[in-house]
Image (cartoon, coloured by chain):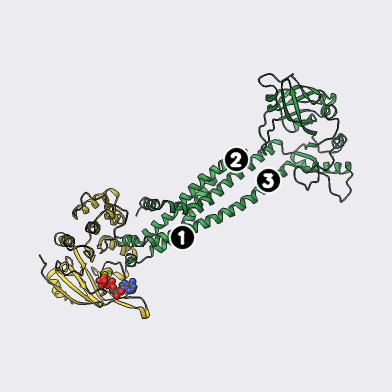
Chain colours: A green, B yellow
Amino acid sequence: MTLPATASLAFTALMRNRLRSLLTMLGVVIGVGAVLMMQATGRGATAYVGDTISAMGSNLLMVIPGSPRRQMGGGMTAPLFTVADVEAVRRRAHDLDALAAVTTRPMRLVAGANNRIVSVGGVSPEFLSIRGWGVADGRTLTREDERQAAQVCVLGKTVRDALFPGGPALGQELRVHELSCRVVGVLEAKGASAFGMDQDDVMYLPFSTFSRRVLGSERVAFMMARAPSPDRIDDLKAQLEAVMRERRRILEGDEDDFAVRDPRELQAVLDQVTGVLTTFLLGVAGISLVVGGIGIMNIMLVSVTERTREIGVRLAVGARPRDILSQFLVEAVALSAAGGLLGILLGLAGAWGLAKAISVPFVFPAAAIPVAFGVSLLVGVVFGVFPARKAARLNPLAALRFE
Amino acid sequence: MASPTRHETVTGPAPLLALAGVTKVYGVGEAAVRALDGVDFEVWPGDFVAITGASGSGKTTVVSILGCLEASSAGEYRIEGVSVQALSADVLAALRNAKFGFVFQNYNLLSRTSALENVALPLVYAGVGRVEREARARAALAEVGLEGREESRSNQLSGGQQQRVAIARALVNAPEVILADEPTGNLDSRTGRDIMELLSGLNRDRGITVLMVTHDPACAAWARRRVVFQDGRIRSDTRGEVAA
Ligand SMILES: Nc1ncnc2c1ncn2[C@@H]1O[C@H](COP(=O)(O)OP(=O)(O)OP(=O)(O)O)[C@@H](O)[C@H]1O
Ligand SMILES: [Mg+2]
């Protein structure tokens, strides 16, 4: 019998027991769906974080308060840095290409009738160039601004649109706290960060202006340092640590109360987390596929028994054992392949929904789809062989006499 | 017992099917049943044989062995001189497909399948293309008088009609031998007579060899040769005139 004929036979048989076929497929649907969803979401998230980090530059280090053993955001209890710390680092770290002090604070900005609470950053003039962040309009912050503690600022696109809707922003005045500030530049739009935050909802002004005229404190929340090239980054890290240990009077053998972080470490951590998660879910999916396969085997065994007479008739009119074998094998494969297709659709839908929900871009898992489909075919073959062989080995007369 | 000399004069030089000392044992040890016990039996081209005998005497068994639905336990079965024991499962399938047509007491049609598809089934396994399959199945259905019922499902047909579909299926691949196991067993006598007319017509007009198991003397009377089984052996094998 030809393959198309066998396939249409299998289709007819499966359509006869629609609900049973659907329930039988479920294991494969879930297994394949889970794999695909995980693949797509994991890839999307890591790729996006990776993009964000590499956009920041591969020769960047951050110096933040708090023990290095604490993960991100653990600097609450450790003292902040001082302007003197920044100067010491600037003088003594040899492999330093650029250094910026940063202090951020959410504050209300007022411009005419409009106001908005924005993450306001007092930054050294090097900050924007370290982050590779240019202006779309106007100019960036300069050393001169810093020296004079000039009352100027640059706005992220979101802030510009909120405070000066429809009108020009450059040259306009706005108020931060008690300070009046002139807009000298509008930053290029960056969009959402890897963690879903709007990076354009910011306003930067010179560090000196912010600390002296707004906060009344010269504390530095963190430093951003750039090495001249990526291969010098380890040297720079060692130098930053040495200077800061000395500055903060940390004794030999004591733990640092600050950390020098390489943004690429974040990527490594993320990769590791995704890897563990992917392995775990692959395991779950594997179990689900095996369970699904056993379900298919079970139903196929039932089907062989139910249709023993039919097999007898087919053998009596000239079906060869291999015709019967392929009939039931194709049926099992059709079941699992249909389950696989359904799983792929559900997995894609799930991945798309999840990507939207955690606002990372949806990456179409082009490579995972044929693999998922192949695996579902394989499940059908592996678990379909036994029932199909059982059918093919039936004795014609015994099958015809089967009650 | 049939003597070869007697047959040679009537039908030709070589038997179509020949059993020599064929024994079939079902089960093992205590539970072993000797369904056939050293049967010698020859079928000649063009024969119309009625096999009768008490229930359990081995009629179904012998027909099944002749039709390659079942292997014998001992003895030799030759088809046109070729020993069947040596043949592969695929060759046996090809023989069932092309040389034999089966008709069963309970029709054995595929359920939820149209008459046309049922009849075309042997052609599927013969590798005949869809168009020719359908044409030949239609012709076979017409031959058994079921024109217009091609699309009917088995459960929409009467017993007699179902048995006609089964005969059309047996016919469709132009077999040399039709093996019918109690083809009228489930039918009333009038419908049974229609079926007998059909079978004897196939034998008479198309030269198809017919072997038919029956309990009904009226049906057996249609055959030219009557074989009686008893306890797995042939008790008598006689030739007679065909009843009107
Ligand atoms: N699969 C089997 N296992 C055990 N015994 C069997 C099997 N098939 C047939 N037999 C036995 O073989 C003997 C012959 O059976 P067979 O079916 O050939 O009889 P029969 O002449 O066709 O009877 P009936 O007229 O009732 O159809 C019987 O005693 C039966 O019980
Ligand atoms: Mg019988």
Looking at the picture, does residue A161 appear above or below residue B235? Answer: above
Q: CA distance from mark 1 to mark 2?
A: 37 Å
* Of callouts 3 and 1, the N-terminal one: 3
Which corner quadrant of the image does residue A153 belong to? top right
Q: Chain under label 2?
A: A
Label 2 is placed on what type of residue? Answer: Ala
Q: Residues within 10 Å of mark 3 (few under 14, many from 20)?
A: some
* Of callouts 2 and 3, the N-terminal one: 3
Do tags 3 and 1 sit on the same chain?
A: yes
- Secondary structure, mark 1, is helix
User: In the rendered view of the protein, which quadrant contains the C terminus of chain A?
Assistant: bottom left
- Name the mark nearer the viewer: 3 or 1: 1
Whole-percent x, y for residue B183 in the image: 22, 64
Q: CA distance from mark 3 to mark 1?
A: 41 Å
Label 3 is placed on what type of residue? Answer: Leu
Please tell me the numbered disc located at residue A355.
2
- Secondary structure, mark 3, is helix
Do tags 1 and 2 sit on the same chain?
A: yes
Q: Which residue is mark 1?
A: A298
